[in-house]
Amino acid sequence: MKRFLPRGLVVALVASTWPLLSASLAGASMPTCIVSLSPTATDTLFTIGAGAQVKAVDQDSTVPLAAARLARKDKINALNPSAEAIAALCPSPASELVVISYNANDIAKQLSTLGVTVLEQDAPSSLSAAYAQIRQLGLVSGHAVKANALAVALQARILGYAQRMPRHSGKVVSVYYEISAAPYYSLTSSTFVGSFMRSLGVVNIADPENTSADAGYPSLNPEYIVKANPNLILLAGDATAAAVKQRRGWSSIKAVRYGHVVVLTANEASQWGFLLGDLAQRISASVIGVINDPRVWK
Amino acid sequence: MVSAATVVATLVAVVVGLVVGPTSIGAGAILADLLAHVGVGHARLNALDGTIVWQLRAPRMVLGLLAGAMLAVAGGSYQGIFRNPLADPYLLGVAAGAGLGATVAIVHDGGAVNVPTWTPWLAFAGALVAVALTWLIGGRGPRSTTSTLILAGVAMAALLTSAQTFLLQQASAQSLARVYIWLLGSLASANWSSVEVVLPYVLLCSLICVMAGRALDVMSVGEEEARALGLSVRQVRGVVVGAASLGTAAVVSVVGLIGFVGIIVPHIVRLLVGTSYRRILPLSVVFGAAFLVLCDTVARTVLAPSELPLGVVTAIIGAPVFVIILSLRRGVRS
Amino acid sequence: MTVVVEDMTVRAGRSTLVEDVSFSVPAGSWCTIIGPNGAGKTSLITALAGLRGLAKGRVLVKDLDVHAQSERQRAHVLAFVPQNPTVPVGMSLRDYVVLGRTAAHGVLRGPSTADLAVVDGVLERLDLGAFASRDMATLSGGEGQRAVLARTLAQGTTVVFLDEPITGLDVRHQLDMMALLRKEVDECQLTVVATLHDLTLASSVTDQLVLLSHGRVVEKGPAAEVLRRDSLSAVYGTTLRVFTVDGRDVVLPSSK
């Protein structure tokens, strides 16, 4: 299963949750052995300086490189983990922290039974929630100060892109964000990447297709995409711009005709952490490119 | 002889289920701990090992015994009722119904850490509704036969599976992966409360199936002749299908769709002890229990710290075992 | 009268298979249903045995309405043998005959020693003792047919319905089977209703014939009389003649 969900843009401080988290986690001893079954958490942990405590990660945690080495070692499938074996990865349950984004096999309960601390971080539905997760990881790993500082800096950077966005009335940038092709999975504004794009003032063609069942990641009919005629296509999956042009009927799409098909690198597209700043930069640059292209607005 | 062998196999499975695992804990130490629990000696496991053995492995092993026993005896009963060697416990839509129920629950909360706690109940309800509908369509009325029932089951399964596919098509890729894992079945989330939930269903339903062995033997001469011999075929069919489906639904809702046990275990037993359901069914209970626990031991150890889906292991181990026994039996006959 | 059929009508969907059939069979006698293919013989006999519902009329066996009984109650008063009995592979002949006792002991309990004694008695009576442990699937056609008869007799009823009991048997085994049944009728007061194709054989063992055509009774009465009526040729759609050879009636198609 290809992992594709970028998981956390942070644009606002969540002042209200901060003391709550501090209170609940104060007094807990700092874990010396962290197992991360969430690629997002893995990236964050390494970025905030908790890398030395991370002893094992799931097979999709490929960023940064140090994590990729761990991922290859144990090949943990986060969708089907063994609680007993995960516990056995660390010398003692008391010093162990396991971060999960999915409670597969009811592992949270089983690990708790063994005395292991479990932190659940799901895909946040808002940027503020994603931001809170970075701080939460800082708190539980003993790197609260650095996590907080980095989160604030990230927030400022991302907020900056939205503020510097040129506003031109009448020029509506419509975007199709492709997570995978055939079926065409996209994301809506109810996701954190989507909400960042909305903060740039773009229209997301997937929004009308949002249903309760897809959690903000709907699959789109290709005919619908062609008809929606986006003037910007962001490719987070395997596809290349050339491949998109080859798709039947797609050459009529404005974004394809005027070359506004942007391939996001795998890391940008699939990691949130602090690479999210890079993703935000790429997306805002692409949007500006469309706004400044007179052919699009003829 | 075969009975003794299956009982031994079950004992081996129980021991293996408790002793084998990523954490190495000696069989002797576990036995001593067990004895200490009942007041003999004082050699206790340390707290962590004790928790691993009695809170993780033991409920999982027991759930494996229950699930294996139920699926195998249900499969054997279905084969008897339908006089069809390809019948398995999922024939009348249990799997499709449970799958749809679980899919609704898993997809409902998209990317959340926890799937809703009502997932097993929805799977259970889905399975029962599916079988009930199948029965209403093909099992009632004076002209219903096992054939109409099977056909109704096929249609129901197709209908529910397409509903499930539709739902999955709407769902995120993340939900797809989760549903997929559920469909392949696993005992990994077992705990004592899941055992408590399943236990009464398995005890009652497998007992009913085993008691129906003689009736199924009578049915081996066909429905019409069985009726002429004094068997109320419709009544037997209702009771056995009801019990087998109810037990299967309970098991499936907790452990997912573990395939192959229900079809292969009764056949292996049949090859060993002959065609009488009075022997096949009780031995399927025992052999199914042992078989599933041994498969689960493989599922939870070979890829540690990940697990293999149990349905994969049952097929990988079950198919060759079946082929070997089949060829050995042929050798004996010729 | 042991078997009384009153205005029996059997339907399947909109087509009528048996219509307004009435006849009766006294205890300890043999009644054979004859008629061409498609006349409704099998529908009639399965309905007699209570395995098929009636659209009209009723069937009384020893004063009990067959269709008002449960399967088990029915199996206490009458036994039925279908045209092609299912041969259960892997079952021993003795276990197969024990199935005849199902109604006696019920399916939740095993056969009692009395049940097994009945079975062994029947096996001996039909000279099947030596085959008792043989797999049903390995028996020859003649042996298999006798096994079916043994199961039927083991049921212990005084009324037996048989649908084409000699299908697929060679001449000797056909005669053997008929002789065995006749013996049960004469010596044990068994009441038999059977369908048969072989008119010569039917006339030689039967007390009474019922000629069926398109689901209706055309003739009924003693064999010697029914075979000599003109309607016989008409029903079969070919000219049939009856000769007497060694004091027995032989039915042959006319050479013209």
Image (spheres, coloured by chain):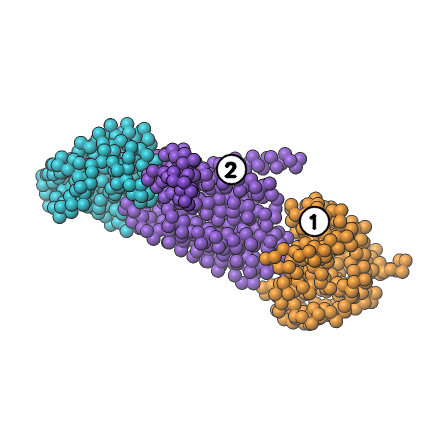
Chain colours: A cyan, B purple, C orange
Q: Quadrant of residue A264?
A: top left
The quadrant of the image that shows the N terminus of chain A is: top left
Is residue C128 visible in the rendered structure shown here?
Answer: yes
Q: Residue at x 52, y 45 (%)?
A: B286
Q: Position of residue A252 (x, y in %)?
A: 26, 40
Judge left or right: residue C236 versus residue A229: right
Residue B124 left/right relative to A128: right
Label 1: which residue?
C93
**Displayed quadrant of residue A112:** top left
Q: Give the SS element for disc 1.
A: helix
**Mark 2 neighbour density, 10 Å: few (under 14) some (14–19) many (20 or more):** few
In terms of depth relative to the viewer, which is nearer, A208 or C67?
C67
Q: How far across and how far down the image is residue A63, in percent?
A: 24, 31
Residue B161 in view of the camera: no
Identify the residue at the far right of this view.
Answer: C246
Considering only vertical position in the picture, is A191 above or below A73? below
Instruction: Identify which residue, A199 or A21, lies in the foreground.
Output: A21
Host chain of mark 2: B
Task: Label 2, secondary structure: give it.
Answer: helix
Q: Tell me which amino acid carries mark 1.
A: Leu
Q: Is residue C202 above or below residue C88?
A: below
Residue B319's label in the rendered image is 2
At horizontal 65% and vertical 56% (from top left) the residue drawn is C111
Q: Name the kind of residue labelled 2 in the image.
A: Ala
Q: CA distance from mark 1 to mark 2?
A: 32 Å
The quarter of the displayed image where residue A261 is located: top left
Residue, x 37% and y 54% (percent of image)? B122
